[in-house]
Image: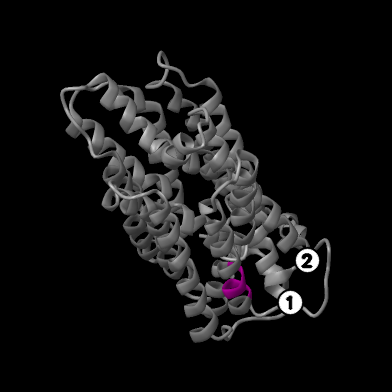
Amino acid sequence: MPDIVQKFHLSPFFLAHLTSAVQFGFITGTLLFAILTIADRFSPSLVFCTAAIAAAVCNLGISMEGIDSATLLLFRFLTGFFLAGIYPVGMKIASDYYQKGLGKSLGFLVGALVLGTAFPHLLKSLTLNLPWKYVVFATSALCVLGGLIIGLLLPDGPYRKPAQKIRLAAFLSGFANKPFRAAAFGYFGHMWELYAFWAFVPVILANWQKHNAALTLNTPFLSFLIIGSGSLACIVSGSISQFFGTKKVAAISLFLSGCCCILSPFFLLNSSAFAMVAFLFFWGLVVIADSPLFSTLVAQNAPEESRGASLTIVNCIGFSITIISIQLINGFVNDGNARFIYTLLAIGPVIGLMALLGNRKAES
């Protein structure tokens, strides 16, 4: 994204707008998918495949010559819109295959999401001397490949219960259930922190480099490792939740990531590269470890006939919250507070823990 900002002669603050455009597209898409119960009425595998191909085409759009900043934002919006047919639909597919062990399966699924999120940073580090468009070409090709794998090789799951007709209010029915609400609000608190952390990892590293010029950091590669390491955390948390309880493991992870928000100034002010990077690695692990667990709790407490719509609307609201936290940090960050401002992300874990632990009947 910094290369795109440079090419189009845009303000550095435009980076947050690029991220938020994808999020806003995803929100719009998930809201429409939820209202129309797309994943419940149609084959989830077919929806996934179609959306992946459409997202890849829109992603390629930013590599076209002659586009302006408004068109750039439009293509990012459309990419996010079609991602609504991938991530929540993928969780729907997993829940159609697994009733027992859902937490473990979603751990692998969200782990794949995390690795995919980090992967462009790896591509960037491997193509430092090549045009930025190579990253776009590679991610689009991988997106098509992923869609075709699901569309051609994965039939609908044995526990799928397709909806027969459109029920415009079906996506809201889960919120009548208190355990569902507790899991959903826990997820919302988690999302306040997650994508803001991911979006600003390269910024955090660059800022530390600015104040410690004697050392040189490979920011793209470190960003990949810090974000991508969370994929292992998802797999581990999903697996151990079968022994210690989904709710308990989610609460511990949310608590630890909240502590990272609060303690972040001590490590970002530290002149030791090892201490700073080790802290970011730990934060990258705990910030995402609870994500598959919240999705598990939401899926387990959602109405069976509208599980896809329920998962989708929770995603929709969660990603709406990410725009607020990303833009809040982007709007207030400056040279004076750049190493303190991430304490604001603790708001999410605190609210999430209050919601999760306030309901003693939530699925565990």
Question: Which residue is pictured at 36% across the width and 31% down the height?
Answer: 204
Q: Earlier in the sequence, mark 1 or mark 2?
A: 2
Question: Which residue is pictured at 37% across the width and 46% down the height?
Answer: 286
63 displayed left or right of 252: right
Residue at numbered disc 1: 41
Question: Which residue is pictured at 40% across the width and 16% down the height?
Answer: 335
Q: In this view of the protein, can residue 350 be seen by the observer?
A: no
Question: Nearest the camera: 276 or 152?
Answer: 152
Q: In this view of the protein, can residue 115 be seen by the observer?
A: yes
Which image quadrant: the N terminus? top left
Question: Would you say the residues marked 1 and 2 are in contact, meaning their CB atoms lie under 8 Å apart?
Answer: yes
The circle drawn on residue 36 is 2
Please tell me whether residue 37 belongs to the stretch shown in magenta. Answer: no
Question: Nearest the camera: 55 or 64?
Answer: 64
- SS at mark 1 in the image: helix
Secondary structure mostly seen in the magenta stretch: helix
- SS at mark 2 in the image: loop
The span shown in magenta is 47-51
Which quarter of the figure has residue 93?
bottom right
286 displayed left or right of 318: left
